[in-house]
Amino acid sequence: MKKHLKHPIFTIISEEADLLGQESFVIGGFVRDILLKRNSPDIDVVTLGSGIELAKKVAKRISPKLPVSIFKTFGTAMLKYEGLEVEFVGARKESYQEDSRKPSVESGTLEDDQKRRDFTINALAICLNSDRFGELIDPFDGVADLKRKIIRTPLDPGITFSDDPLRMMRAIRFSTQLNFIIESSTIEAICANKERIKIVSKERIMDEMNKIILSDNPSKGFKLLDKCGLLDIIFPELAAMKGRQEIGGIGHKDNFLHTLEVLDRIVPNTDNLWLRWSALLHDIAKPRTKRFIPKLGWTFHAHNFVGAKMIPGIFRRMKLPLNEKMKYVQKMVSLHMRPIVLSEEEVTDSAVRRLLFEAGDDIDDLMTLCEADITSKNSEKEKRYLKNFQLVREKLKDLEERDHIRNFQPPVSGEEIMEVFGLSPSREVGIIKAAIKDAILDGEIHNNYEEAYSFMLKKAKELGLEPIGNQSE
Ligand code: CTP
């Protein structure tokens, strides 16, 4: 292990730990990531003694002015050095209260500290003191679990999860990120303790869910959340999408599985968390809008608009941002059918201009979402859709160059219309403005001031309006 501790920070910690006479170890995710050949910028150091004292000594050695953040109540200290974040803590045994994730802390041995950690793969430690520098301490077979690709708790999983229910989310997140299997008694304990997730803050739950969404295979995580019964509790709208219904031999697809397929399909094309969220939410209103209409079959009328309306409620409850990120997801959900409808019909300039006008700068993301949404098992149909999308993309590019519709502002403003015809804010102004916009989007006139101005005069005349006075005077 020595070769992984070449960074000078480890030598400094080692020397200062020796001077204080405190056994000290690097522990947890950093050690796991060495063995997984991943880079981790966070180093956790556990010491048999005061973590705060050790942190102060190390900071002084690096630079007399290096600030140390001290959290007295938790007995921890943190310093930042050359892009690394190093956290120091005294080894402890912990016991948790029933209704809180906050442990009461007592000092303990290294093994006490290791066994109170979440998973065997996160309970590995490497000694930093000079006489045992680089020695791996693995009392729970974490290395073997890394090799076998298994998530397992050091203690009875019921105790580990009941102590800190966030770990149920972490188990599923690690299993998804690393493509590991959760050992069966560990899964059973998650099922048994699922209700305790309610004592965990929404923000922490969402941190884990976002990591699942940002992984290479997010469907795995959501299927596990469902399997353990956590999905019903933390994301009931998504759980409601499960299952197929059949009437008179006509069924609809399982919208939960379809959604997960769309999410997986978008992964290679974007790392944008909110575009991935849009994939997860694009059909969220299907259960609410589902109808069976004899002769027509299953319909999900206006599910895109109903879905967009559901999003603020979901984001508020889940403590996701209520800012432009949410608005972006709403826009994606409400527009997600448009390119499909467009490509089913003849791809006209006018329809493409309107799409470009409504999507603005998010048009490329919208096309990415729509392409992921084509999950038809019928490969002829899939090919036809994707070919039509290609056509839509070409038209978009062509029209964008010619007409500059993206982020379009009408060339004649409402104020100007009022001024020319001596109107106060009224229905007429709205009608004229909308008519100018439509004329441009339909290609009747070009997107410039002169043509828009003459069009305005023509339209106003139809409404019986004349310009007041002589505008040039
Ligand atoms: N840990 C734990 N229980 C938790 C959170 C963390 O036992 N609920 C322990 C684990 O030993 C973990 C270490 O604290 O390895 C550091 O936690 P953290 O930095 O949150 O996660 P990492 O395991 O480093 O993984 P990642 O950076 O991917 O979140």
Image (tube, rainbow, N blue to C red):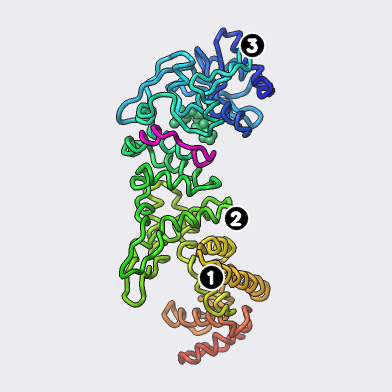
Q: CA distance from mark 2 to mark 3?
A: 48 Å
Relative depth, front residue between 374 and 321? 374
Which range of residues does the magenta coloring cover? 175-189
SS at circle 2? helix
Q: Nearer the viewer, mark 2 or mark 1?
A: 1
Proximity of marks 2 and 1: CB atoms separated by less than 8 Å = no
What amino acid is labelled 3 in the image?
A: Ser
What amino acid is labelled 2 in the image?
A: Asn
Q: Is residue 32 above or below residue 344?
A: above
* Residue visible at 36% across and 54% down in the picture: 237
Query: What numbered label is drawn on residue 381?
Result: 1
Specify the principal SS of the magenta part: helix
SS at circle 1? helix
Query: What numbered label is drawn on residue 64?
Result: none
Is residue 176 shown in magenta? yes
Q: Earlier in the sequence, mark 2 or mark 1?
A: 2
Is residue 319 shown in magenta? no
For label 2, the residue is 269
